[in-house]
Image (spheres, grey):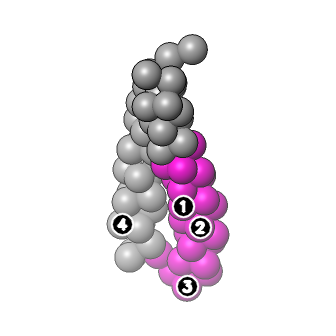
Amino acid sequence: MNYLAWSNEYKSTADELAKVIDKLKSERKAASPSGKKELDRKIAKFRVYFRECMETAALLRERHGDAA
């Protein structure tokens, strides 16, 4: 199993999620108060996904090192 390639895929997904989070933050600046609340929920959800991807990428990278 190629842990490094798998790790890189998770890191790439995390990078894409970071872009989505940045876009939502930009939208939030011009949103109404109720819109801001909804965007805050979305941002929080994407931050959880981002964090999980980063943690998984780190774990897989570590396993790659152990397998070498």
Label 4 sits on what residue type? Ser
- Looking at the rendered image, the disc whose residue lies closer to the viewer, 2 or 4, is 2
- Residue located beneath label 4 in the image: 26
- Looking at the rendered image, the disc whose residue lies closer to the viewer, 3 or 4, is 4
Dot 3 or dot 4, earlier in sequence = 4
Q: Return the residue nearer the eye: 37 or 32.
A: 37
Range shown magenta? 31-57
Up/down of 55 relative to 41, above or below = above
Distance between mark 3 and mark 4 Cα atoms: 14 Å
Q: Secondary structure at mark 3?
A: helix
Dot 1 or dot 4, earlier in sequence = 4
* Residue 18 in picture, x, y percent from top left: 41, 52
Label 3 sits on what residue type? Pro
- Residue located beneath label 1 in the image: 47
Label 1–label 2 contact, CB within 8 A: yes
Majority secondary structure in the magenta region: helix
Crowd band around label 3 with a 10 angstrom C-alpha radius: few (<14), some (14–19), many (20+): few
Label 2 sits on what residue type? Ala
Q: Quadrant of the N terminus?
A: top right
